[in-house]
Each structure stands twice: as structure tokens, then as C-alpha cells.
Image: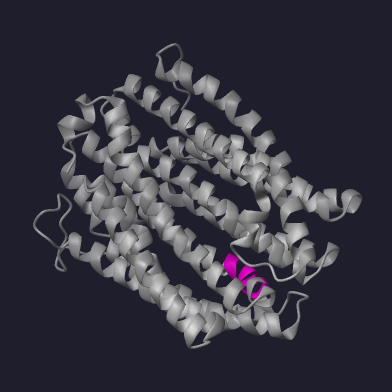
Amino acid sequence: MVSDEEMLSDSIWSLFRRFTFPAMAGILVAGIQTIIDGIFIGRGVGSQGLAGVTLAFPFVMFIVAAGIMVGMGSASLIALELGGLHRDRAMRIMSNVFPLVLIAGAIITVLGLTLGGSLIGMFEASDVVRSMAVEYVDIIFLGSIFILLPITLDPLVRNDGFPLLAMRTMVLAVLVNLVLDYIFVMHLDMQLFGAALATVIAFAVSATILSLHFFSSRTGLRVSFSMMGFHTREVLRIVESGLPSFAMQFSVAVLFLAHNFVLLQHGDEGAVSAYGIIGYSFAIFYMLFEGIAVGVQPIIGFNYGAGRYDRVCRTLKLAMVACVVIGSVGVIIVYLVPEMVAGIFNPDTKDILETTVTGMRIIVASLLVQGIVVVNATYYQSINRVGYALFIHLGKIFVFMLPLLLALPMFFGLRGVWFATPVADYLMFAVVMVMLYDELKVLRGEKCRVP
């Protein structure tokens, strides 16, 4: 456990290592559950299965967005309160988390089962692919509460000073998912139904472990059934603070929906399969960026709440450097062995492989700047500057990405779909650099904070 004194006195590198490495591992391991589904579906079902799960993926991301909103929103507020030595306020926020997740899970389940099939029916895909997608999302929606809980509790466990517990729990969940995917998809031929069921069971395992932590005596944020409540003011604060995280994940879901529509207009189901493979392949790097961002969130929030802006500044710079290093590794791997990366998911025709490799080589340029954008958005969320964080997340998608995604294919066809991502990322990167230049002046005391 990391104490309050260590948060203020340990070296930034030491705190970065103790919080960020487990966070990266935990998020990577949690995200690998979806990648495992993709690998088994690609090998056990084929390209139609990959197209089906790609159509379903935006709906899964919506559940993830809701969980991250509650988790990061409450974690950011709790870190600021603990940094300001207001543990009673931190506990009042914590008391709302479980009731809020349960209510959100019930609403998502009802809406998902009611509307999911109709929404997937809007895509111009074959009946087989649409049927597979509906089969997948129905199980995911039924188990939404089990997905919401670990996603919500993971950042809170880290804020509580137990980053290794969060990581080990996610590792266990991945192992469970791996074994069940092998049994359900490869041996029992349960196809996308089996893949979704394996995912829900794996999340349920991690939900149980992380929930029990907050009822144990070792936690600093111990809850009980008697203290739980739904306090409107605190819930609204959690939602407001978590909106940037929700916006980031929800915009990813919107982006996937938009890509699916455009790909089916300018390509075919093979292009959708290729996009799914690209998404799975690059997901590892995106998750590492997010792991760095959420890993430094407790450090930034606590030290900002304590007025230690010099430490906040060093943490932010270290996080950005780490993202550039990881992004550079990704670029090297994709340019050297793209066929090997794509081959993990077993594209079953030469055309799909060629389309995948072309898209990879274009989109990979985003990795050099994408992490910096994610870290800066999380920084503003950590200091409760919600509007700035929302601007970064929503601006990238709705100001840059979606217009480019609609316009570029009109001139460049399928290549235009691939080029939309790096062009949007570099435009948002330029905006973030202007914001960062101004923010560093504030942290150094060279400029006053504008309300």
C-alpha cells in the first residue's frame, strides 16, 4: 500500500513505477480479454465472425464507457479529497459507487436487450453477420453488471494504494477468459455466443474479487451495506468528473459505428473484418497509453490537491515521454512485420490480409502522438478541469475525425478511411500542444489560473 506521505515525498519515478506499471498491466490484461475473443473467433469462426464481433464492438464500448465514467470520476474526486486531507468527504463519495453501478447496470441491460438487435439491423451486412453480432451483444448486455463492476473498481483499488491487487485480478480474469474461449469456441463450437459468455464469466470473477476488497479490513476506503446510499449531489459530481472518460470511450464507440457504415459503403464485409483486425492489433498500444494515463491520475490528483505543482509537472512530462517510447515501438513492429501481426487473427483470404496490412501501415502513424493526447486529457480530468478534458476527447472525434471519415473516402476510396485516423490525431495533437504550453506556465507559477 502507498501511504499519503509517500505520495508527497517519494521520487516521481518511484511513484510512476509503482502506480503506472501495474495500471498498464491491469488495463492491458483486461483489454486482452476482447483480443482473445477476436483471436478465437478469427480461428474458430472465420472472417464472418470477425465482421460480426466488429459490428457488436461499439455496444460493448458503451458499457465500458459507463464503467470508466463512474470509476475515473469517483477516483479523481477521491484522490483530490485525500490530497487535501478530507477523508470523510472521500468516503462519502465512495459510498455512492456500488449503488450507482447497480442502477447503471440494470438500465444498460434493459435498453441493450430492447434496442440492440434493431440497431445492428441498420448495418448493410449479410443476415449471417448481423445474426452473429446480435448473438454476441445479447449475452454481453445480460452480463453488463459484471463488466461494469471491475471496470469501475479498478481505478479505485489503485487510488486505495493497491495497484498490484488490481493487476493480479485482471491477470486472473484473462486466464479464465482464455480457458473458457478455448472450450466454448474451439471445442463446443458455441461461436460468438461462447466468446461472449466466456468474457462475461471472466469479468464476473474480477468483479467478485475487487468488490470483496472494499468490504475487507485492509482497505482505506472500506464500505458497508449500511453506509451505501444514493446521494444526488455526490452522484452528479461523480458523473461530471467522469464525463471526459465517458466521452473518450463513447466517442470510440461512435467512431466504430461510423467506420462500420463507411466501410460497408466503400468496401465490403471483408473491409469490416480488416478494420476489426487492425483495431485488435493496435488495441494493445492504445491500452498501454490509457494505462499510463490512469496510472498517473492518483499521483497528479493527490499532489495537485496538496499544492505540489512541481511534482505534477514532472509526472505529466514523464507520462508523455513513456507514451512516445511505446508508440515508437508500435510503429517499428507494424512496419517490419505487419503480415505476422495480422496473421494472429487468421484472415481467411488474401484480399482481407492485403487490406489489413494497407490500413495498418497508414493508421500506425497515430501511435506517435495518440498517447500524448490521452495523457493530457486525463491530466485535466485529474485536476477536475472537466471542460478541457471533454474538449480534447470530443474535439478529436467530432471536430476532426468524423468530418474526415466522411470526406476523405469520397476522394481516396478505402484508403481515405484509413487516412482519417492519423490526420485527425495529428490535428488534435497540435491543439493539445498549445494547451500544454499554457498549462505548464500555470504549474510553474508564471501565469495565474483562468477560472
* Relative side of 206 to 187, left or right: left
Using the rendered image of the protein, determine whether residue 237 is visible from the camera's viewpoint: no
Residue placed at 35% from the left, 40% from the top?
Answer: 20
Residue placed at 31% from the left, 58% from the top?
Answer: 153
211 and 333: which one is in front?
A: 333
Percent x, y of residue 199: 43, 73
Residue placed at 46% from the left, 60% from the top?
Answer: 32
Residue 231 vertical position relative to residue 12 in the rendered view, above or below:
below
Percent x, y of residue 403: 77, 48
Percent x, y of residue 335: 67, 42
Residue 404 vertical position relative to residue 306 in the rendered view, above or below:
below
- What residue span does the magenta drawing correspond to? 51-58
Rendering quarter of residue 183? bottom left
Q: Say if the magenta span includes residue 358.
A: no
Residue placed at 57% from the left, 42% from the top?
Answer: 330
Percent x, y of residue 131: 65, 85
Residue 268 vertical position relative to residue 325 in the rendered view, above or below:
below
